[in-house]
Image (cartoon, rainbow, N blue to C red):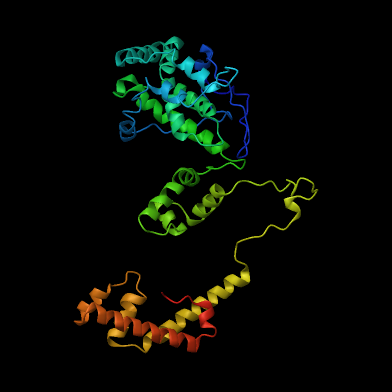
Amino acid sequence: MASGRKKTSKPVSRARGASVKPAAATEPEEAEFEAEPEPGDGTPVEVAEPDEEALAEDAQVDEDLEALPARVLAPAKENQLGARDPLQAYMAEVTRHPLLTREEELSLARRYRDTQRVEAAYRLVASNLRLVVKLAHEYHRNPLSLLDLVQEGNIGLMQAVKKYDPERGVKLSSYAAWWIRAYILRYIMDNWKMVKLGTTEAQRKLFFKLRQEQEKLIKQGFEASPKLLAERLNVTEQDVVEMDQRLGHDEVSLDAPVGEDSNSTRGDRFLPSNAQGAEERLGNEELRLLFKEKMNAFAESLEGKERFIFEKRLTADEPLTLQDIGNQYGVSRERARQIEAALINRMREYMREHIPDFDLVATPKQ
């Protein structure tokens, strides 16, 4: 059983693509159950107790655990020397521990709660090792090692066994899944990049949901803008922008040489910035105010149908349809479109007359 690192060890932050030999999976000593389980960096993971809704979601989390070793080992092949993959060796150890019946689980859980007998806790943990592997597979992503995730998940499993209440009416697997995921997610955020991610609640939420929410918005026909993403995920726009940049780019050391035969580093050069300069921001703000002023002046020259279309369709946050406008004035949809097109042409000519280089700074509506 992969029991996690000793408290004196430190996690290794790995750059993307680095080749690291996975830690070997070993059987735990019984004394390990007597200490408070901690993640790899020695900092306890703060996990709130799962509510009934969360437990219900994991009610079937232990399905197909009997067949799990075959699915995990199917892609693995022995090399020409016949050496086994570390994952194969670990899964061979896992299969030595049978799954418990519900009655056996309750009996062992009550015995551990009442007597603190380590043997009871050991059997509860060992019988759920396959569950840890299953959940680790769900969160496995390069460059992290699957066995590293399993190690952290096993620590969460031990914590769950210590806190499990057999009288609550839920299976240990449903309760343990909550703790296993918490420890795995903590490890991923600490080791995903050299610069630690997920140091705040908003960053943790964005780390796991940003890409998913972006894809969902695009499928719904919306532009996945930082503002809309921030509203959907209940975070700030700045948090969205920063996490999107960090997830989309690898870290680059400023001390790394520019080329193999070069003594200069990236830090010796000025790094270009995509941010707008102060002069550009000031110019854009002045242009926005000028457009607003001229649009208001143009609106004052309109009346009747044209004023209605300008206010209710061209500049409205929720514009009316051409059919709505036709119904308002008793004309056809096509006639409303013609009036709108003529109005847009007049507005464009007005802007060309009152704003220098209008065609260079404006993008006409197609």
Q: Position of residue 311 (x, y in %)?
A: 33, 78
Q: In the rendered view, would you say 225 is above or below 191?
A: below
Image quarter for residue 168? top left
How many callouts does the rendering have?
A: 0
Residue 234 visible within the image: no
Q: Residue at x 30, y 82 (%)?
A: 338
Q: In the rendered view, would you say 261 is above or below 124?
A: below
Q: Residue at x 58, y 49 (%)?
A: 249
Q: Residue at x 28, y 23 (%)?
A: 169
Q: Position of residue 187 (x, y in %)?
A: 53, 33
Front position in the image: 232 or 145: 145
65 lies left or right of 148: left
340 lies left or right of 141: left
Residue 306 visible within the image: yes
Q: Position of residue 55 (x, y in %)?
A: 33, 31
Front position in the image: 184 or 22: 22
Q: In the rendered view, would you say 320 is above or below 43?
A: below
Furthest toward the front, the residue is: 80
38 lies left or right of 338: right
Quadrant for the C terminus in the image: bottom left
97 lies left or right of 245: left
Q: Position of residue 300 (x, y in %)?
A: 37, 87
Image quarter for residue 110? top left
Front position in the image: 338 or 281: 338
Q: Residue at x 48, y 86 (%)?
A: 352
